[in-house]
Image (cartoon, grey):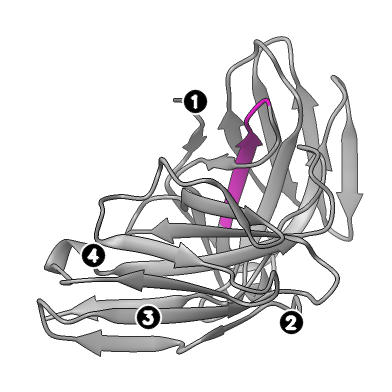
Amino acid sequence: DTGVSQNPRHKITKRGQNVTFRCDPISEHNRLYWYRQTLGQGPEFLTYFQNEAQLEKSRLLSDRFSAERPKGSFSTLEIQRTEQGDSAMYLCASRAGGAGTDTQYFGPGTRLTVL
Amino acid sequence: ILNVEQSPQSLHVQEGDSTNFTCSFPSSNFYALHWYRWETAKSPEALFVMTLNGDEKKKGRISATLNTKEGYSYLYIKGSQPEDSATYLCAFPNNAGNMLTFGGGTRLMVKP
């Protein structure tokens, strides 16, 4: 257990519905990251926060994707009007430091299936 | 976009076998390389952060080496056990250090 939790662990939805996932980072970590992993691929960076500020969001896959971290603690990732291609594992990670050598600690992910 | 590649994509070994796999990454502007182990239904677990050319790190039966000049890292598992079955991922941070680019992973299956 890394100390990063994600909910729900699994989500099945119908195409066109909106979904929201939650990530609770390790409490003293001010940096929080979202990644997406599709079958047979490594995780792909989506966005990241330092405290409540979203510092990188150009990699969000479309304008249907949005993320928030309103109080600099937990974060939510929302996908609007889901499509079958959104089916994937969504991972959250957190860390304290900002250097490339600092470890990102991952949660167990939320697996999304869009029917 | 950084190109991080891992080989092989999957590997089946018998319990007790030793094995190794490769991560290749851009050799220019090297900063660090991360190795993770990801077991099914669990969180990816950090194994090593490699920073210096020639680095060798060890954790139990798992070790890793780094060659920044030629742009590769090897992960070795000595005497594989069924509990080593997992996907092993390497990841390369961007210059700002705020995002990781992952390889596709090597899926290891150890048969008892």
- Which dot marks residue B2? 1
Residue B90 visible within the image? yes
Question: Looking at numbered disc 1 in the image, what kind of residue is underneath it?
Answer: Leu
Give, as a single range, the part of the protein colored magenta.
B88-95
Of the numbered discs 4 and 2, the one sitting upstream in the chain is 2
For the residues carrying marks 1 and 3, which lies nearer the camera in this image?
3
Name the magenta segment's main secondary structure. Answer: strand
Secondary structure, mark 4, is helix
- Same chain check for tags 3 and 2: yes
Residue, x 69% and y 69% (percent of image)?
A: A72
Residue visible at 65% across and 10% down in the picture: B28
Of circles 3 and 4, the one toward us is 3
Q: Residues within 10 Å of mark 1 (few under 14, many from 20)?
A: few
Q: How far is the residue under mark 4 from the one under mark 2?
A: 27 Å
Residue position for label 3: A20
Amino acid found under the numbered disc labelled 3: Thr
Q: Which residue is mark 4?
A: A86
Q: Amino acid at mark 4?
A: Asp
Sequence-first disc among 3 and 2: 2
